Image (spheres, helix red, strand yellow):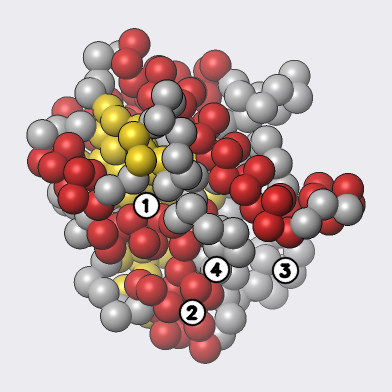
Amino acid sequence: MYKKVILKLSGEALQDDYNGLILSGHKLKEIGNLIKELVSNGVNVGVVTGAGNIFRGRIAKDAGLDVEDGDYMGMTGTIINCKAISSVLNKLGVKNVLFSALALEDVAIKYDANKARKYLKQGYVCLFAGGIGKPHYTTDTCAATRAIEIEADAILAGKNGVDGVYTADPNKDKNAKFIKNTTYQEVLDMDLKVMDRSAIELLKNTNIVTRVFSMENIDNFIKVSLGDDMGTTIKE
């Protein structure tokens, strides 16, 4: 069982697929209940979300925006997503604090690693928004950085449409082979599309485990946190 984890959620995991809205009330409630159960099981939880439901880099490119401006727009999208999760957790009675790497004092606390560790020790869920506060880095790098800073045991990376790591995209290549266990160095050497290379480089010399699995069933996060070996395990 993992004692301290980072939940890495894609922005798409929050969006309403039926009405085209950026957020789904149903999905938010599922994620809120998932986090509540993790906390009740004694797990310290940090959360990092993507913002693909709100903004993608190609939009900036197509619109002729600067890459840096597009990155900042994506970072603010993660603040919207984390604020939504925070609101749901508040209604469920789950103590939580929203940190942002970008200054936004009326909405979130400016990120500080020492404060985050203290809140986690007190049983708060910590939501990490705003990426790492700099352009040119993805939320994968944010998840890796925050996992290191809070001394997490694992990053739980639920995926849409895939149940783990493959040698190629299984939805496009019928010859793609499933990988049950691998190392961060092998991920780099094989150029596996799990996380950005910068995130893997950060994790490869740590004791942090990354678990990649399907989040089609949201309860998979609970199962993995309790020791189920579904999906792919990546270690040092």
* Circle 2 Cα neighbour tier, 10 Å, few/some/many (<14 / 14–19 / ≥20): many
Q: Earlier in the sequence, mark 4 or mark 2?
A: 2
> Which amino acid does the dot numbered 2 rest on?
Val
* Circle 3 Cα neighbour tier, 10 Å, few/some/many (<14 / 14–19 / ≥20): few
Secondary structure beneath label 3 = loop
- Residue 174's tag is 3
- Residue 196's tag is 4
In this rendered view, identify the residue nearer to me: 221 or 82: 82
Secondary structure beneath label 4 = loop
The residue wearing badge 1 is: 156
> Which amino acid does the dot numbered 3 rest on?
Lys
Q: Earlier in the sequence, mark 4 or mark 1?
A: 1
Task: Look at discs 4 and 2 and give the one toward the viewer.
Answer: 4
Q: CA distance from mark 4 to mark 2?
A: 10 Å
Vertical comparison of 28 with 183: above or below: above
Q: Is residue 170 visible?
A: yes
Give the residue at the far bottom of this rendering: 189
Q: CA distance from mark 4 to mark 1?
A: 15 Å
Q: CA distance from mark 1 to mark 3?
A: 26 Å
> Which amino acid does the dot numbered 4 rest on?
Asp
Q: Looking at the rendering, which quadrant does residue 155 occupy?
A: bottom left
